[in-house]
């Protein structure tokens, strides 16, 4: 058994056997794809650990459960509220129940959740996944799968198009007289973080804006608070944050340091979460189409479950837009 008496997972077996998780999967589901020696070794290790093969990378349940899972990176992040509500609404209309699980920004927790959940659901939506592309593709070969906020080649993916919103934010800051923008980065393993930073690097030069970067940071208000000192050290007058929580945490940290937002530093967030207009000052932010993402996620998943989906393809990116509030102002004189 694994730690704390939990049922060992395919990843526990792989670690103990010194092989990849995909090799363990093939040893159980496609033994002809590995050598007899490797298969025997994997099975021996699995028996020693008390591992029982599950449908993690095998076949889905033999009968429909009318249940789908939504696995999010952090259930306390308000960015998921609209997605969860939209997906639940669409699922209920089709007679499905949604089970929501939080990976707590951990790929190991996410793997354990999938190990326990896949045998009991008809399909899975991953939102903000930290798993490697190859792991997600392996899972999608055997189960109905949709990925949100990340593009995984060969797997149905629903992503926001960052360029329109970030382009609008940069143009807005330039129009206010700012000549440099600092990106407050999110988690190092986030696909979305990379997309937002690349959009800034691509678009800033056309506006004669210098682009700097602080991070990576935890995508939380605490992460924004901790980044305050470095933002001040760099002398930033305009900050574009990975998400609204980081932006709100930064504004709190700046206020505690006696720095006024937006009079001394303009701050722009990303996502337009429900509380973005409730902070002080109300946050200028790039709005992501959260409700549409949730609705589209279930529609794409349902097509796969019903067997009517065409060959896996990425879904066209959904546009983002700038929402102006009061956390940005003309550059300080």
Image (cartoon, rainbow, N blue to C red):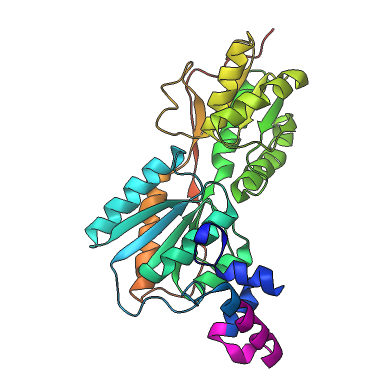
Residue 211 x/y as whole percent:
74, 32
> Is residue 131 positioned above or below 230 on the image?
below
Residue 39 x/y as whole percent:
64, 86
- In this image, 169 relative to 6: left or right? right
- In this image, 48 relative to 299: left or right? right
Q: Inspect the magenta stretch and tell me whether residue 34 lies in it.
A: yes
Q: Quadrant location of the N terminus? A: bottom right
Tell how many labels: 0
Q: Quadrant of residue 62?
A: bottom left
Residue at (61%, 27%) from the top-left corner? Answer: 224
Q: Nearer the viewer, residue 179 or 299?
A: 299
Residue at (70%, 28%) from the top-left corner? Answer: 182
Q: Inspect the magenta stretch and tell me whether residue 169 lies in it.
A: no
Residue range of the region highlighted in magenta in the rendering: 28-45
**Residue 179 in view:** no
Q: Quadrant of residue 24?
A: bottom right
Residue 137 x/y as whole percent:
57, 69
> Is residue 255 positioned above or below 23 on the image?
above
Residue at (44%, 59%) from the top-left corner? Answer: 125
**Residue 294 in view:** yes
Residue 193 x/y as whole percent:
63, 44
Q: Quadrant of residue 172?
A: top right
> Is residue 220 positioned above or below 251 on the image?
below
Q: Is the magenta region chiefly helix, strand or loop?
A: helix
Q: Nearer the viewer, residue 286 or 307?
A: 307
Q: Nearer the viewer, residue 272 or 203?
A: 272
Q: Quadrant location of the C terminus? A: top right
> Is residue 223 positioned above or below 145 on the image?
above
Residue at (62%, 48%) from the top-left corner? Answer: 190
């Amino acid at each position: 058994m694994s730690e704390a008496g939990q049922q060992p997972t395919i990843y526990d077996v792989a670690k103990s056997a010194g092989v990849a998780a995909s090799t363990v999967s093939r040893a159980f589901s496609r033994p002809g794809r590995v050598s007899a020696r490797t298969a025997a070794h994997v099975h021996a290790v699995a028996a020693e650990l008390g591992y029982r093969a599950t449908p993690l990378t095998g076949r889905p349940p033999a009968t429909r459960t009318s249940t789908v899972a939504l696995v999010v990176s952090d259930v306390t992040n308000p960015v998921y509220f609209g997605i969860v509500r939209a997906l639940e609404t669409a699922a209920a209309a089709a007679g499905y129940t949604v089970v929501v699980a939080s990976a707590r920004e951990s790929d190991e927790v996410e793997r354990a959740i999938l190990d326990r959940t896949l045998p009991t659901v008809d399909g899975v939506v991953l939102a903000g996944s930290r798993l490697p592309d190859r792991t997600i593709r392996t899972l999608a070969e055997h189960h109905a799968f949709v990925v949100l906020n990340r593009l995984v080649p060969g797997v149905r993916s629903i992503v926001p198009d960052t360029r329109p919103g970030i382009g609008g934010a940069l143009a807005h800051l330039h129009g206010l007289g700012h000549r440099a923008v600092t990106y407050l980065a999110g988690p190092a393993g986030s696909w979305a973080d990379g997309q937002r930073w690349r959009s800034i690097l691509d678009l800033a030069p056309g506006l004669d804006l210098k682009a700097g970067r602080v991070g990576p940071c935890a995508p939380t208000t605490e992460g924004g608070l901790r980044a305050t000192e470095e933002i001040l050290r760099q002398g930033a007058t305009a900050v574009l944050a990975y998400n609204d929580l980081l932006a709100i945490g930064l504004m709190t940290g700046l206020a505690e340091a006696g720095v006024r937002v937006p009079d001394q530093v303009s701050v722009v967030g990303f996502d337009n979460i429900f509380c973005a207009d409730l902070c002080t000052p109300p946050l200028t932010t790039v709005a992501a189409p959260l409700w549409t993402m949730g609705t589209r996620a279930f529609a794409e998943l349902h097509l796969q479950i019903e067997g009517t989906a065409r060959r896996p393809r990425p879904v066209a990116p959904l546009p983002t837009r700038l929402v102006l509030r009061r956390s940005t102002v003309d550059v300080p004189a």
